[in-house]
Image: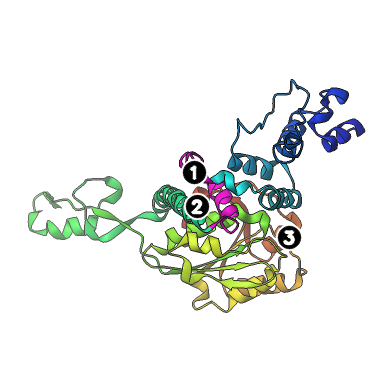
Amino acid sequence: MRSPTERWRLMLGRYADRQMGGCLGREDGRRDAALDFLYGREYRERGIKPAKSPRGASLDKTQIRALDWLAEAERLFPDRVFEALRQDALDRYGMSDLLKDPKVLADLDPSPGTLRTLLSFQNRADPQLQTEIRRIAQKVIDEILQKLRTEVLRALTGRRNRHMRSPLPSSANFDARATIRANLANWDAERQRILADRLHFHARQKRHLDWTIILCVDQSGSMTDSLIFSALMAAVLTGLPGIRVKMVLFDTSVVDVTDQLDDPLSLLLSAQLGGGTDIGKAVSYCETLLEQPSRTVLAVVSDFYEGAGPRRLLAAVARLQAARVRMLGIAALDDTGRADFDRQMAQQLADQGMNVAAQSPHSFADWLAGVLA
């Protein structure tokens, strides 16, 4: 709980340091610095200089780029406040101009945070900058996909192939029947045993699965990272033999994006982040996509804050459970594996047969491998 002095200090900004002193803690100091990076330019344009402050958190223009500021602001402020800050940055201060610096775009790290920030600027930038943003975003996606594909393939491969032979001996892969058949001519009547001079072993092969995976992804603003990783996971899974992937995005409406899975960037650019949430409507739509229920995995990626009431959602999940659909509830799908979600709703879904957890892409791949085994 902040004191009245701390609240006034945050409202007045760092230009009140001389009168109020350093009363802010570390996190509030970062919030103050983030606000000053954006709104302090009002004072600088009037020639007003702030009092020097000993605080450690600094976001001075010479020390931070627009993309860094945007990522920091998203972490520090609630969604509604962050959206207002971003709107002011773009409309009021024209910060998209800062992204025209070639050095800024060239130095970007290939991370989900960078991708999220680039996507947030895409629709507000001028046409020339949009082209550059798409190029950089595609490069980031390609690098993340390369790493993600390796992790997913490692999780979903590795069963024994009983129709192929391996030249590499291993007791775990030893094929006793094939070895006996190949050495019947070497029967030793005196010893009453086969003298085997040719041993056979099973080879290993990639799984060839016959499954349909339906990704049902919440596209509300709080689920941006999960949406990014869901699109990337869909692209990886689509390339596996024997697996069909379908994907729908939802808020209060439902959009089927299955035809865009081979182009994650276009899919992400078409997403309409924000709005309400009607999970029941989305899951009911997914029911219409079922062909072989017992060979289908439905993965609902959402924070489970249902805006339409739980009755329709719970009824749909109960029907899917009766049809023997494998259901996974993913409260977050990002590189942290942590989530803020409606635990009460998650428990109700679990009671109806849905397994619910927050996942990183790596742990989700392992989880999925267990379900498909």
Please give the residue where the numbered disc 1 appears in the rendered image.
105
At mark 1, the secondary structure is helix
In three-dimensional space, the C-alpha distance between marks 3 and 2, rounded to whole angstroms, equals 32 Å
Q: Position of residue 279 (x, y in %)?
A: 68, 68
Of the 4 image quadrants, the one containing the N terminus is top right
Q: Height in image: 67 above or below 326?
A: above
Q: Is residue 278 visible?
A: yes
At mark 3, the secondary structure is loop
Q: Earlier in the sequence, mark 1 or mark 2?
A: 1
Please give the residue where the numbered disc 3 appears in the rendered image.
305
In three-dimensional space, the C-alpha distance between marks 1 and 3, rounded to whole angstroms, equals 36 Å
What is the three-letter code of the residue carrying label 2?
Ile
Q: Earlier in the sequence, mark 1 or mark 3?
A: 1
Q: Quadrant of residue 18?
A: top right
Please give the residue where the numbered disc 2 appears in the rendered image.
133
How many residues crowd mark 3 within 10 Å: few (<14), some (14–19), many (20+)? some
Q: Position of residue 136 (x, y in %)?
A: 46, 49
Q: Nearer the viewer, mark 1 or mark 3?
A: 1
